[in-house]
Amino acid sequence: MLTRPDSGVRPASLIPVLLLLLAAPLTTALAQSDYPLEPFLGKWSGVFTTQDNEFWGVEDFICFAGCPREVRDYMVSLLDDPANDDRPLGELMGETTGFSVAHLASVLTPLGSQIQQANTPENDPKLHCQPYGFVRQATNPLPMNIRRLGEHLLIQYEEWSLLRSVYLDGRPHPEYQTASLLGHAVGRVENGILIIETAGVTADRFSDSTQGGHSSELTAVERYSVHDNPRRLELELTLKDPVTLTEPYVIANTWLFTPEVELIQDSCGDLPGVF
Amino acid sequence: MRVKWRILSIVCLLAVNASTGAHHSPAMLFDLSQEIEVQGVVTEYRLGNPHMRIYLDVDNDGTVEPWLAEGGSRTVLVRKGWDGTEVSPGDLVTVRGQPSRDGSNVVHLEYLVLPDGTELYVEDLNFNQLEEIRRRRN
């Protein structure tokens, strides 16, 4: 009878296995924290749902849906001027909005100017349940949830309950594509900045306040960075459109990290009294 | 029922009563140097995107005029407990806010007074709070 002198398992041989088992959660955590997109994941909310946070300054509220740095700086200059101390805030906001419209007009092509003048609040398709296009969604102050979807990103916007895929596998924009509401987005992380490039966007407005518009030749680059105290997501969105813009137009906005916020299902017809 | 409307020029009180609007700056569309108060009968109410809207029939010295009062963002109001049943067609309500710049019968809605007298704040941002932030800044 052939016997195996070591057929039993020695306790000492289990030590490496136990160490591996104990280390597994740690290595998993390390792998997750090494995921370059990890800082960007989660729910983020703009001033509408975080007004009580002391981070916000008055100038942030005039730019609640995003605005060029020049516009924000203009509001700050008005607030800093002692001559304006007795002027109502609404009046300063009105002056800043006028500056905003003029600032945009200075970078519009003749056709871009015509579009701006033709766009009015009354003929905005949003009033007929046409969801915002890419620019107004990307700068939207309402909450959004940035989620990992396999090797890609899925951005869930509360307003209109729109979903946006961002491909991270290095693929280019398709050579032939039909323009769509949110376009085709590809992204990457460079030096801690999430960069998303978008093209193939349906011609639309890119601002309610300035009534500016873009063509389907729009290309856009979003640069997202995460900061602390409070934890927040900052966006710099650069728009290029040879049809309506003579030079790049840059919009910035900020959202606070709000894991406690529950995104509300949004549509035009799921509540009594709605459109 | 006779419904009256009045416009109050309150340039100096703007700081207290102006608001920042929803997805567009109200400074572009509305005259922030005035406040108007309009009383009328609700013909339609929409807690819709992107802003809530109340359509009113307003009796202006015997002439019935259609008015529109536009308030805050739908989901912001839903988060505060609104559910689309706040008013119904036929309700007599009062709306208070800023008039349109182009003279059309539109109100940038800040306060909605229900038939039972309850007053609701309808805007996304609390302007009084913004003034407080401004005071702290200075």
Image (cartoon, coloured by chain):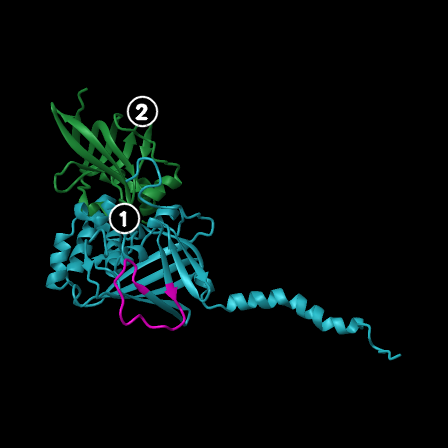
Within the image, what quadrant is residue B38 found in? top left
Q: Amino acid at mark 2?
A: Gly
Q: What color is chain B drawn in?
A: green
A170 magenta-colored: yes
Residue A190 at x, y = what percent? 39, 72
Q: Which residue is mark 1?
A: B23
Q: Amino acid at mark 1?
A: His
- x 16%, y 32%: residue: B66
Above or below, comparing residue B26 to residue A185 in the picture? above
Disc with the residue nearer the chain's start (1 vs 2) = 1
Q: Which residue is mark 2?
A: B117
In this view, the residue farthest toward the bottom is A2
Read off the magenta span.
A166-184
- x 63%, y 67%: residue: A24
Q: What color is chain A drawn in?
A: cyan
Q: Nearer the viewer, residue B121 or B86?
A: B86
Residue B88 visible to an observer of this rendering: yes
Q: Chain of mark 1?
A: B
In this view, the residue farthest toward the top is B1
Q: Residues within 10 Å of mark 1 (few under 14, many from 20)?
A: many
> Where, quadrant-wise, is the C terminus of chain A in this rendering?
top left
Q: Considering the whole magenta stretch, tell me its main secondary structure.
A: loop
Left or right for B54, reference A149: left
Above or below, comparing residue A75 to residue A171 in the picture? above
Q: Chain of mark 2?
A: B
Residue B16 at x, y = what percent? 27, 38
Q: Residues within 10 Å of mark 2 (few under 14, many from 20)?
A: few
Within the image, what quadrant is residue A250 found in? bottom left
Left or right for B40, reference A110: right
